[in-house]
Image (cartoon, rainbow, N blue to C red):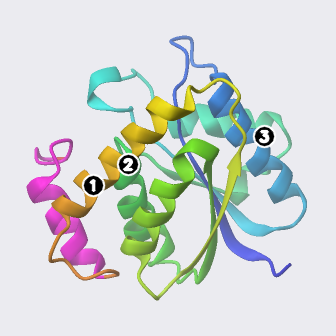
C-alpha cells in the first residue's frame, strides 16, 4: 500500500474530564495503528469545541493529540484542525486549511462504521477530484444502528440541501456557503 500524505481522525465525544469515550478511543486507536504501519506522513486530528449543543471548554483535537502522543505518535507528525463544530466543518476546514495548502493529494479519513457513508459523501464533495480520499472505520458495538443510520441519512440530506448549486471541489464557494447557510457557522469565527 502506498503511503498517504495524511491520516485524518475525526473527533467524537469526550467525557467532561477530557478522556475519550469508547467511540472516540476506537477511532484514535485505529489511526495510531495505521500510522505506526507507515501508512501516512502525517496524522491530522480534527475537532473544535464540539457541536453547539454540547460545547466543551477544550478543543477536542488537543485531547486527541495528548492521547496519540501518549501512544507513541511523534508530535512533529501531528497536524490539528480546531475550528470545526461538526462533520461538515471538519471536511471543509481540514481540506481548506491543511490539505490544499500543503498540496496533499492522497488522504485517509477515519471515522466509525455508522458514520462512514455520510463522511464519504461529504469529503468526496468537498475534495472534488483534486484529492484522493480513502476511508477506514472502526467498528462500534455501542451504537444503536437503526436510529443512528436514519439520523445520518437525514443529516446527509441537509448537507446536500445546504450546498445545492455549489460545484464539488470549489473550496472557496463551499466555504462561503458554509459561512452563509450552515447554522453552526453563520456567526463570525
For label 1, count other residues whose C-alpha is less than 10 Å away and answer few (under 14), some (14-19) or many (20+). few
Q: Residue at x 51, y 63 (%)?
A: 120
Viewer-nearest residue: 39 or 72 = 39
Q: Is residue 171 a member of the stretch shown in magenta?
A: yes
- Mark 2, residue position: 153
Indicate the position of residue 68 as horizontal and vertical percent values: 74, 40
Q: Secondary structure at mark 3?
A: helix
**What number is the disc on residue 96?**
none
- Cα distance, mark 3 to mark 1? 30 Å
- Residue 59 visible in rendering: no
Residue at the far front: name it. 146
Mark 1 and mark 2 in contact? Answer it, CB < 8 Å. yes
Identify the residue under disc 1.
157
Q: Position of residue 121 (x, y in %)?
A: 44, 65
Q: Could you say whether the residue bearing mark 2 is in a helix, strand or loop?
A: helix
| Magenta range | 170-188
Q: Is residue 88 above or below residue 133?
A: above
Percent across and percent down for residue 163 are 20, 66
Residue occupying image coordinates x 86% and y 78%: 1
- Would you name the residue on which mark 3 appears? 29
What's the distance in space between the residues labelled 2 and 3, CA to CA? 26 Å
Residue 106 in sight here: yes
Q: Secondary structure at mark 1?
A: helix
Q: Residue furthest bottom?
A: 129
- Residue 4 lies left or right of residue 33; in this view the side is left
The crowding category of the residue bearing disc 3, from other C-alpha atoms within 10 Å (few below 14, some 14 to 19, many at least 20), is some
Amino acid at each position: 500500500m502506498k503511503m498517504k500524505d495524511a491520516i485524518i481522525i475525526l473527533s467524537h465525544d469526550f467525557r467532561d474530564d477530557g478522556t475519550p469515550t469508547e467511540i472516540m478511543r476506537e477511532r484514535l486507536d485505529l489511526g495510531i495503528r495505521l500510522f505506526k504501519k507507515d501508512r501516512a506522513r502525517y496524522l491530522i486530528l480534527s475537532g473544535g469545541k464540539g457541536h453547539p449543543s454540547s460545547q466543551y471548554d477544550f478543543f477536542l483535537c488537543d485531547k486527541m493529540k495528548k492521547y496519540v502522543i501518549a501512544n507513541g505518535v511523534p508530535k512533529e507528525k501531528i497536524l490539528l484542525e480546531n475550528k470545526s463544530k461538526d462533520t461538515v466543518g471538519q471536511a471543509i476546514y481540514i481540506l481548506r486549511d491543511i490539505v490544499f495548502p500543503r498540496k496533499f493529494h492522497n488522504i485517509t479519513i477515519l471515522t466509525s462504521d455508522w458514520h462512514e457513508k455520510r463522511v464519504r459523501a461529504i469529503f468526496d464533495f468537498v475534495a472534488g477530484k483534486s484529492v484522493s480520499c480513502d476511508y477506514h472505520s472502526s467498528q462500534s458495538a455501542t451504537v444503536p444502528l437503526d436510529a443512528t443510520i436514519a439520523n445520518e441519512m437525514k443529516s446527509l440530506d441537509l448537507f446536500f440541501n445546504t450546498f445545492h448549486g455549489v460545484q464539488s471541489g470549489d473550496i472557496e464557494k463551499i466555504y462561503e456557503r458554509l459561512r452563509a447557510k450552515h447554522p453552526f457557522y453563520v456567526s463570525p469565527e
